[in-house]
Image (cartoon, rainbow, N blue to C red):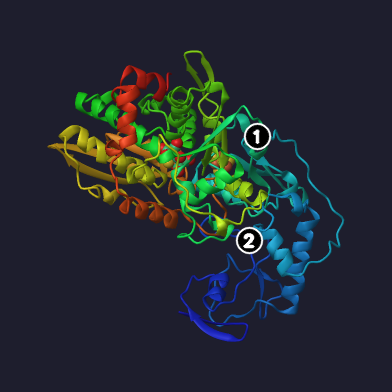
Amino acid sequence: MVNITIDNHTIAVPAGTTIMEAAASIHIPIPKLCYLKDINEIGACRVCVVEIEGQDHLVTSCNNVVEEGMTIYTNSPKVRRNRKHTVEMILSQHDAQCATCVRSGNCTLQTIANDLNVVESPYKKEICVEEWDTRYPLVRDASKCVKCMRCIQVCDKIQGMHIWDVSGTGARTTVGVSGNRDIKTADCALCGQCITHCPTGALRERDDTEKLYRALEDKDTIVVAQIAPAVRTAWGESLGLSREEATVEKIVDALRKIGVDYVFDTTFSADLTIMEEGTEFVERFTKGDLDLYPMFTSCCPGWVRFIKSQYPQMANRLSSAKSPQEMFGAVMKTVFAKKMDIDPDRIFALSIMPCLAKKDEREKPLFHGEFAGHGVDLVLTTRELDRLIRADHIDPKTLKDSAFDAPFTEGTGAGVIFGATGGVMEAALRSAYYLITGKNPEADAFKEIRGVNKNGWTEAKFDIAGNTVEIAVVSGLQNTRNLMEAIRKREVHYHFVEVMACPGGCVGGGGQPIHEGKEMASDRGSNLYFLDKTSQLRFSHENPDIKHLYDEYFGSPGSHKAHQLLHVQE
Ligand code: HC0
Ligand code: SF4
């Protein structure tokens, strides 16, 4: 142990503890702007400086460790002056248009400036302006960048994509797309992790809310919405609702109040995906088609972008099943349109997703008979949903539980867990077991693959009717790259692999509410497993609305009709 004094408190902490951690252990919070535990510990912003007795220079507390006998001051006059000066300098290069910023109220720079009582900007403003095509799903505003380097570090260390880089020195230091590339051609996976780790409004999603308002204004248009599994775990976080209060049924109420005509649950089409993907897996598995092993899940568009750009030679191993979002869109423009006797061109299909890459996935065309267009017309993130609710001045506390619409009302627990890492695999195995043996397994038979594996991937073997099924589950793109290399070098062998681009799966998606310095995926994932545990139905193949859809329209999973609408035609 190391003995130190912080602000006149004498404590002993383990060797290797940083000054910031030591202070936090006795409830002395030190302000910080760039620091992110295990990701960005470079002391770039210098907001976290402290004074050490006997030393002339202030030191950054995030990346300096305690030494025996150190006497530390976190709020001496020198520290106070220096910190305030630093923040004033940062503000001199920051376009502080807080009234029109998506991060207002949830911006680390705003909080620190307010906390330090910065009430005027004494320095001349020198704002960096940079061209950016704001039609791209990922938007960067250089005038709000504080050069904290978090985006670079998250994209490098967690996602292994190296999209951002720093250029210039001193006051001219700036962050941009690496190698002078254009973001549109830089192989960005659109996972959005750089956005959720940005402390300011320098990175954000393209705001598409106006497109919804235009559709709502048009009296001829019928707006149908779907809500993704992971949205229910997070939408209430920035609206002041507790987890218990923030039910998915209240989102249904909110969307109806906003003017949406029909509201459905993506868990319904997650069940449909399981029927198609599970059938495809059982076919590949029983044929022993080794060339196509492992079969990869295909529902995460960040991962699909990744494999197509990084491992194109393995892209043929993706399941051909469309994602639940796309299956839902296809069903809307065909089965639903026919059932309601409406022209599919009048249907405007909206998705509420925890994801940025879904905005790109929806661009895929859909052709069916006379219809040529898209299954999904608009994707809004969970954050945009929250902004819609606030914009209409809906008091979240007054929302009531409201049921999903018919005829696609039911979603099972298996569909709900799609939003957490391992969930798609678990749901698929539950139904694959049934397809192979004709019997249901225990609903929790495959639970060992649950949970966020931060540094690697999870593998398991299961016996199904005397056959061993070898599977792997991974989330986060650097982990994924490591797994892909092991597969490529034949160091590992699996039949079926689930990949989610965002750490922890969609619950940790790039479109979810942002919490400074906190990773929420684990908590949100546990919530989905709780919802599964308490569901009446826990097997996709038992969803009565799915059975009905096959009886009435598709015939059986993997049928010609199903392939036309529910699988990618490439
Ligand atoms: Fe996901 Fe999905 S589970 S990708 O994370 O498969 O975005 O929540 O909606 O489509 O269902 C996201 C979440 C989805 C899809 C589903 C899948
Ligand atoms: Fe990197 Fe993901 Fe951000 Fe693209 S969206 S720059 S891949 S972190």
Quadrant housing the C terminus: top left
For residue 263, the mark is none
Rendering coords of residue 126 (x, y %) = 83, 50
Disc 1 marks which amino acid?
Lys
With 533 as the anchor, is 390 left or right in this view? right
Tell me residue 515's x, y (percent): 56, 57
Q: Which residue is mark 1?
A: 211
Q: Secondary structure at mark 1?
A: helix
405 or 42, nearer to the observer: 405
Asked whether residue 216 is in view, the answer is: yes
Q: Quick check: 120 above or below 233?
A: below
The earlier-in-sequence mark between 1 and 2 is: 2
> Percent position (x, y) of residue 379?
56, 36
Q: CA distance from mark 1 to mark 2?
A: 41 Å
Residue 53 occupies which quadrant of the picture?
Answer: bottom right
Instruction: Report the front residue among 536 and 470.
Output: 536
450 horizontally vs 113: left or right: left
> Identity of the amino acid at label 2?
Gly
Q: Which residue is mark 2?
A: 43
Residue 504, how many percent across, how many down? Answer: 43, 49
The residue drawn where x is 48% and y is 29% is 329
Asked if 311 appears above or below 35 in the picture, the reply is above
Residue located at (20% from left, 36% from top): 434
Vertical arrangement, residue 440 with respect to residue 370, above or below: below
> Nearer the observer, disc 1 or disc 2?
1
On the rendering, which quadrant does ligand 1 occupy?
top left
